[in-house]
Image: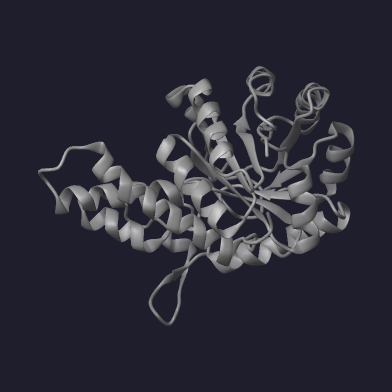
Amino acid sequence: MPLVTTKDMFEKAYKGGYAIGAFNVNNMEIVQGITEAANEVNAPVILQVSKGARAYANHTYLVKLVEAAVIECPNIPIALHLDHGPDFETCKSCVDGGFTSVMIDASSKPFQENIEITKRVVEYAHDHGVVVEAELGALAGIEDDVKVSAEESHYTHPEEVEEFVTKTGCDSLAIAIGTSHGAYKFTPEQCTVNEQGVLVPPPLRFDVLEEVTRRLPGFPIVLHGSSSVPQEYVRMVNEDGGQMPNAIGVPEEQLRKAAALSVCKINIDSDLRLAMTGTIRKFFNDEPSKFDPREYLKPARANIKELVRHKLIDVLGCAGKA
């Protein structure tokens, strides 16, 4: 099947109590690992591209890689999404350039200005058959060009969501309930220690999510900054020459709970980068004389595939839903 929008995906996810995985892609191996896993477990999937990824890999190369994945995996729905579009011009470029979904992130702007910018993107995108994700609230952390300090972050105000969705016409809404961008989502001081001596981050604000759901019944909600930062890959990075102390992510059981509610799309980024980086670091430590990219990217791709497979089955609950 050709590239699809997320509209049908989200309708089914909302009714079925699961979420669609949205994975950021930067190169061929990441695209392959994600889509091969989704194809094997028969799961719909969203491949998303940030402004930084477009600058790194080039818009055309990324679109063609995704189109190749569609050819190789013809039986699963695949959407191509712009992640954190910073302005109308970037969103327009992606709409015109083959994307089926775009995010306009004007969450740093005052409320009314966010509405105005988002509405303009929605009108253009809808005229071209493309759906739009918007954002209310500000997540802390760093992801490509998105940099928000802890002091600047704030939870979504549920009392604003009805007006925002009604006036903008957006198709889905990213909200802030305690997730954050990057691999360093929480400090040790924010965490408690369980009986196994593992740091446990503070729980997500499900009260905010539930109130948003009450005010927007049936409307698809999105979570950004939802990487779990698998500790096996953090250890792999650190044991093989890296320095990533106190990299702490969102517990997977909290993401599964969110997916069972109104959250229809969960963004996962840092986990895949960790899997790739940790695998490559270990490869060079084990095989210091090797230099062929095919030799070290092959196991990296395999670990990305296995990680995505786990997310689709055990966290998102979307396996078998294609």
Q: Is residue 128 visible?
A: yes
- Rendered view: 121 above or below 71: above
Instruction: Locate residue 311, reporting x and y percent.
Output: 53, 60
Image quadrant where one finds the C terminus: bottom right
Q: Nearer the viewer, residue 206 or 262?
A: 262
42 horizontally vs 109: left or right:
left
Identify which residue is drawn at 51% across, 54% down.
Answer: 37
Name the colour scheme: one colour
Question: Of 84 and 130, which appears nearest the observer?
Answer: 130
The answer to whether residue 139 is left or right of residue 218 is left
Residue at position x 71%, y 53% in the image: 264
Q: How many marks?
A: 0
Q: Position of residue 200 (x, y in %)?
A: 48, 69
Question: Residue 82: where, in percent of width, then height?
Answer: 62, 32
View extreme (bottom): residue: 195
User: Does 214 appear above or below 7?
Assistant: below
Horizontal arrangement in the rendering, residue 312 relative to residue 222 (left or right): left
Q: Position of residue 9 (x, y in %)?
A: 74, 49
Q: Is residue 83 above or below residue 32?
A: above
Q: Quadrant of the N terminus?
A: top right
Please name whichever residue, 73 or 286, is drawn nearer the observer in this view of the structure. 73
* 18, 213: nearer the viewer: 18
Which residue appears at 78% of the width and 43% of the height? 7
Tell me what residue is drawn at x 37 percent, y 57 percent: 246
Q: Is residue 186 visible?
A: no
| Farthest-out residue, left | 289
